[in-house]
Image: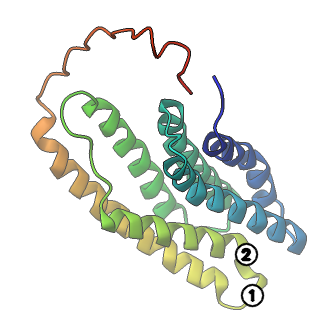
Amino acid sequence: MQLTLANQLTLLRVAIVPALAIMVMIDGYVARLVALLLFTTAAVTDYLDGHIARARGEITEFGRCLDPIADKLLVATVLIALVAADRAPWIPVLIIVLRELGISGLREFLAGRGPSLPVTQLAKWKTTVQMVALALLIIGDLLPFVRTAGDVALWLAALLTVVTAVGYVRSASGFLGVKPKPARPAKVDARSTGNAKG
């Protein structure tokens, strides 16, 4: 399988996660700046990989599967590390992590039963607020009022998390009793053999 540029950026985001978690757990000015730099880099790759894949016509099944996993791994790991370092309230973190697991499971369950759950505008706002909250909490008390602003943003993200989760469950309710569609045998086209990009 040949990795596209977009897939390489997504894999870079996954590779950043362990180092980012370690930096978040370490106290000190330098560690927090490094953590913020790593988090910003990961967030930029999250923005770029999808745009590059669409612009270059390199959307792959591997990328479709890996991108949401990388996103959730990044967010969940940073949130848990912040709680472990006593730099974030655990209740909104628990809400956000459980929601991500639940909606991911719901999407997987609904695969083949009907239309996929579309990402709503409110969910995009939730993601933006969530990323801002994480950046503020990573900086922490290095600057006045930043920790407080991060806590407020995290609680707001948790609220939006609950609202969007309810919306997704309502959208999916019509398909919960639908049996999955049987898979059709794949047809092999001799002309296209060996041209797949993965």
Front residue of 148 and 33: 33
Question: Given the current orientation, which residue lies at the most extreme front position?
Answer: 191
Q: Position of residue 134 (x, y in %)?
A: 60, 68
- Residue drawn at (42%, 57%) of the image: 95
| Figure colour scheme | rainbow
Q: Vertical placement of 137 versus 144: above or below? A: above
Instruction: Say which mark, if any, is on residue 99.
Output: none
The answer to whether residue 83 of the structure is visible from this angle is no
> What is the distance, in whole Å, between disc 1 and disc 2 at their CAs?
8 Å
Residue picked out by circle 1: 143
Amino acid type indicated by mark 2:
Ile
Contact (CB < 8 A) between labels 1 and 2?
yes
Amino acid type indicated by mark 1:
Leu
Q: Position of residue 70 (x, y in %)?
A: 58, 44
- Element under label 1? loop
Residue picked out by circle 2: 139
Q: Quadrant of the C terminus?
A: top right
- Residue drawn at (69%, 65%) of the image: 40
The answer to whether residue 63 of the structure is visible from this angle is yes
- Residue drawn at (77%, 58%) of the image: 25
Question: Is residue 16 rendered to the left or right of residue 65?
Answer: right
How many callouts does the rendering have? 2
- Element under label 2? helix
